[in-house]
Image (tube, rainbow, N blue to C red):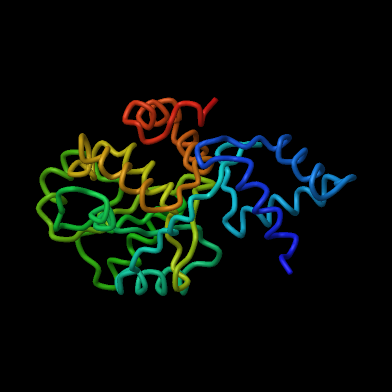
Amino acid sequence: MIGIGKKIENIIRSTYSSSENIKRDDLYRLLTKYFYGDLNRSTFDWRIYELKKTGVIEPVRQGVYRLSGGKKIFYPIISNKQKRINRLINKAFMDINYCSWNSSWLNEFSRHQVYSNILILNIEKEFMQSVFHLLMDNSFRNLYINPDQKINDNYISENKESIIINSLITKSPLFKIFKVPIPRIEKILVDTFCDDNLLQPFKGEELITIFSNAFEEYKIDIAKLINYSRRRKKEKQIKAFLIQNQIISEDVFL
């Protein structure tokens, strides 16, 4: 016998196409019509949570969803250097918020491969200097805090690998792999879009390729991407970029 969750999924998938936006109120009316004559809001909220958790729908923006395409979740390979840094930070500091990621992860999406790597540490501002000295004391080299264009051109661009420490924006979308905090793909894409210094090899036409391939291959939470771009004060620019390059249709944002 098919469970209630599967029946709800079947009705939703038969009612909406993958390109349609699903408004929260419309979803409520659909569930009350077929399953619950007197669906209260707390039960409805739980059903929304279950539909997102099981990959039936994904948020576009507040109160608007779309069918999930069954795409993969981005799980990059965590380097031994990231794991070692994570152990050092956790041992030295209590309740620090930070994440790390490698610019080489972008090679999966780009047309041209970049063979140098920048390990980016986004750290709470008040801990940046302390983490810098912690890593220096533990024999890490090619370390830079908020490097400017001159430092990038003269030093970082010549290194096979560098470690960059800069501040973590509050409410950044993060998760953990092997207990190592890393950014979600939405943050990686927005940070790459916003960067005009360190990630130059991934700009221009390459940036369009990166976004297109990421959206094609992986599950992207558009609501998280836009919310984070808003925190970086780039919401209008990134929406225009996505629409102009036909990565997302304009009606997603209506």
In the displayed structure, 25 sits above or below 145; it is above
x, y percentage for residue 12?
65, 46
- Residue drawn at x 78%, y 48% is 44
Quarter that holds the C terminus:
top right
x, y percentage for residue 246?
35, 31
In the displayed structure, 165 sits above or below 95; it is above
x, y percentage for residue 88?
40, 73
Looking at this view, is 43 or 146 the one in front?
43
- Residue drawn at x 30%, y 70% is 79
201 horizontally vs 61: left or right = left
Looking at this view, is 14 or 184 the one in front?
14
131 horizontally vs 59: left or right = left
53 horizontally vs 68: left or right = right
Quarter-of-image position of residue 151: top left
- Residue drawn at x 20%, y 36% is 205
40 horizontally vs 11: left or right = right
Looking at this view, is 112 or 162 the one in front?
112
- Residue drawn at x 36%, y 43% is 191
Count of residue discs: 0
Q: Residue furthest right?
A: 38
Looking at this view, is 98 or 43 the one in front?
43
x, y percentage for residue 18?
51, 42
In the displayed structure, 90 sits above or below 159; it is below
Quarter that holds the N terminus:
bottom right
